[in-house]
Amino acid sequence: MTLPHVTLGDGLTVSALGYGGMSLSDIYGAVDDETALATLTHAVDAGLTFVDTANIYGQGRSERTISRLLATRRDEVVLATKFGIAGGTVGARGIRGDAAYVREQIDLSLARLGTDHVDLYYQHRVDPDVPIEDTVGAMTELVAAGKVRHLGLSEATADELRRAHAVHPIAAVQTEWSVVSRDVELSVIPAAAELGVGFVPYSPLSRGWLSDAFTPEQIGPGDGRPRFPRFAPENLAANAGLRSEFREIAAAQDLTGVQLALAWLFTRAAQTGVTIAPIPGSRFAAHVDEWIAGATVRLDDAVMARLEPFAGRIHGNRSFDRNWTSQRGDTAP
């Protein structure tokens, strides 16, 4: 099956599915570098040539792993990385968006990636102490210098997206979006559609919770998911029935949970008028093939209606702190 390509904002063309490079580190459990590289290589071989990472993933480990593939296949890959989350562990990090940090971090990322440019450079989180116009102004300098081709924002509010886009065209906004995480539909998605900005949903599978293979027992030492409220034991128990219902709907469509989740996302994006390129991630090459099958399915109105209430029924916020997400721009819970 051949993956189609889509055009996000600012003329950036990418594969309709990307590969989320956070999984090249130990965030969801231990993975060795050779297994990580083999999974990444399989994803690119399968047509997921839009590769997404960040300076913070594994403290640079994800970028270094990607560099090994780029050494011989740079021209095949549309490469995205990020800056803006500084140091520490999940839930205990800072945010920086000052110009000096922007300039410093692109050079460090390029060195780790072994390339002279990235195709898409995201501000990973918006710094509340630095006007977004100043941060995007510094990012624009990187475009002029040839170090960056396109600009993006992650977890920006609708207002921040509009303000940033007024400084320089924004190619993509990246935020969590799935059948059980739909807060972005309140204002961010409409703003992106209005501006012609592409949307890159991360965690489209709700950090694996929507997959058939998920069990609470697979969350072992070092797994970062328990830091998110949805993965607290009491919420996993409260949500078990909802997950079972989701899997029943998937089976009725001859789909896996993963495939239904991706099919819902592409169908919903078409309804809202935004172009998307989701970036699921996994340590396992076999999962990539399952994703592709879901990317080409579109759901009918009856199935979409059955899935409509799921986001309102789930227990536990998608983030440990809504102030670190685009939710801070909305009044709804």
Image (cartoon, grey):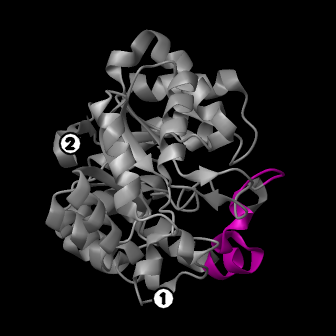
In the rendered structure, the answer to whether residue 296 lies left or right of residue 292 reads left
**Residue 281 within the segment the image draws in magenta:** no
Residue 291 visible to the viewer = yes
What's the residue at 20%, 73% (across, down)? 301
The magenta segment: 220-239
The residue lying toward the viewer, choosing from 273 and 92, is 92
Tell me where residue 240 sits by quadrant. bottom right
Near mark 2 (Cα within 10 A), the count class, few <14, some 14-19 or many ≥20, is: some
| Residue labelled with disc 1 | 333
Tell which circle, 2 or 1, labels the residue nearer the N-terminal end: 2
For label 2, the SS is strand
User: What is the C-alpha distance between the residues marked 2 and 1?
Assistant: 32 Å
Residue 121, compared with residue 153, is above or below; it is: above
**Up-down: is 53 above or below 225?**
above
| Residue where numbered disc 2 is placed | 6
Please indicate whether residue 216 sits to the left or right of residue 299 in the image: right
Image-quadrant location for residue 80: top left
Query: Nearest the camera: 286 or 34?
Result: 34
